[in-house]
Image: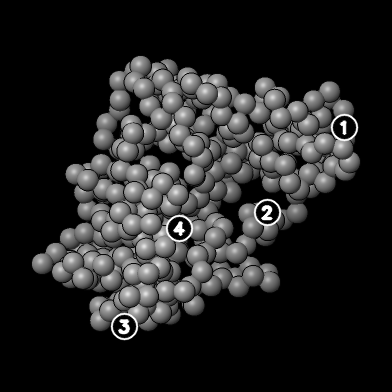
Amino acid sequence: MQTVYVGLSGGVDSSVTAALLKEQGYDVVGVYMKNWSQDLPGMPCPWKEDYQDAKRVAVQLGIPFKMFDFQKEYRQKVVDYMIAEYQAGRTPNPDIMCNQEVKFKVFLEACLEDGADLIATGHYARVKNGSLLRATDDNKDQTYFLYRVTEEALKHTLFPLGEYAKPEVRKLAEKFGLVTATKKESMGICFVGKVGIKDFLTHELGKQETGNIVDAKGQRIGRHDGAIYYTIGQRHGLDVGGGLPYYVTGKDMSKNEVYVTTDLNDKKLWAAQLQLTDVHWINGAPEGGAKVQVRTRHRAPLVHATLKFDKGNVVLTLDDEIRATTPGQSTVLYDEQKVIGGGILV
């Protein structure tokens, strides 16, 4: 009998994951990953509540339960990375880094060392022979967040929810009688729960220097409360009154300026070509000239593109232009159902 360590987060998805694997005859061990426990002003961290829910599920299922503390690794590899990227004027995705550095590296290694044959999480994705495949339910597919996982890690990973739609998972939770069956999904950044990114960055870095908001004609039309908070394509939070809505087209961190337009067809808002750096391939690189499908954000529609290599970077020529691509953002490449890999937008 194979032993599977399941990352129990205290949510419904990971709870059902553990229940399904137990039903399938695996020797299941539940593990709560303590990645973040710091309270922020007026916003207590919910980790104790999540830990208790995870523990209750383990008791209900009659499986052993452990807690692994990865706060140090998490701070260094995920939080510090995210803050540095924002300071550089880019828009990172901490959930992707969490999967790469914590869940499918540190957690996997700790589990294997502790006696596991495999690990499992509540992600909506599928894995087959060391390859990552999109989930059956396109609406819940989470492969965008998993593209930096290695082939070796995938060979030790199970994603039992990959074949299910979310409503089915809720029904399974009720069928199994799990205490988390009606628990709401946690949204927002993986480690700060209900805290917005602006509040988090302000807490970590202090109040930012205000600066000018400049329109397409070079006219100063307002003031921003910190260029670090703005991302390309953003419409809300500009506080520029009257007339048509403004969209962020760019920013200059050295000048502390944010650039905006009212023209949704502004060339700066659209990209026909993308350049990726820090590229990761799951099962080896494709050939230059390969036809791929591209996703620049979670749940964004897939766009067809042609791939070529240029001095270690990847250049994608898109069949259709994509709106609001942002430096620091991840772009994930697919070959139909299979995830090939991806990289960071320059």
The residue at 75%/28% (across/down) is: 263
Q: CA distance from mark 2 to mark 1?
A: 23 Å
In terms of sequence position, does the residue under pointer 4 or pointer 1 come before the other?
Answer: 4
- Which residue bears the numbered disc 4? 74
Q: CA distance from mark 3 to mark 2?
A: 38 Å
Which tag is nearer the camera, tag 4 or tag 3? 3
* Placement of 79 over or under 6, stated as above or below: above
User: In the rendered view, does 166 fall on the left or right side of 264?
Assistant: left
Residue sticking out furthest to the left: 1
Q: Position of residue 32 (x, y in %)?
A: 37, 70
Which tag is nearer the camera, tag 4 or tag 1? 1
- Which residue bears the numbered disc 3? 59
Residue 198 — which label? 2
Query: Label 4: few (<14), some or many (≥20) within 10 Å?
Result: many
* Placement of 284 over or under 116, stated as above or below: above
In terms of sequence position, does the residue under pointer 2 or pointer 1 come before the other?
Answer: 2
User: In the rendered view, does 148 fall on the left or right side of 330?
Assistant: left
Residue 43 location, quadrant: bottom right
* Placement of 336 over or under 17, stated as above or below: above
Q: Position of residue 195 (x, y in %)?
A: 62, 62
In terms of sequence position, does the residue under pointer 1 or pointer 3 come before the other?
Answer: 3
Residue 220 — which label? 1
In terms of sequence position, does the residue under pointer 4 or pointer 3 come before the other?
Answer: 3
Q: Position of residue 237 (x, y in %)?
A: 76, 48
The quadrant the C terminus occupies is top right
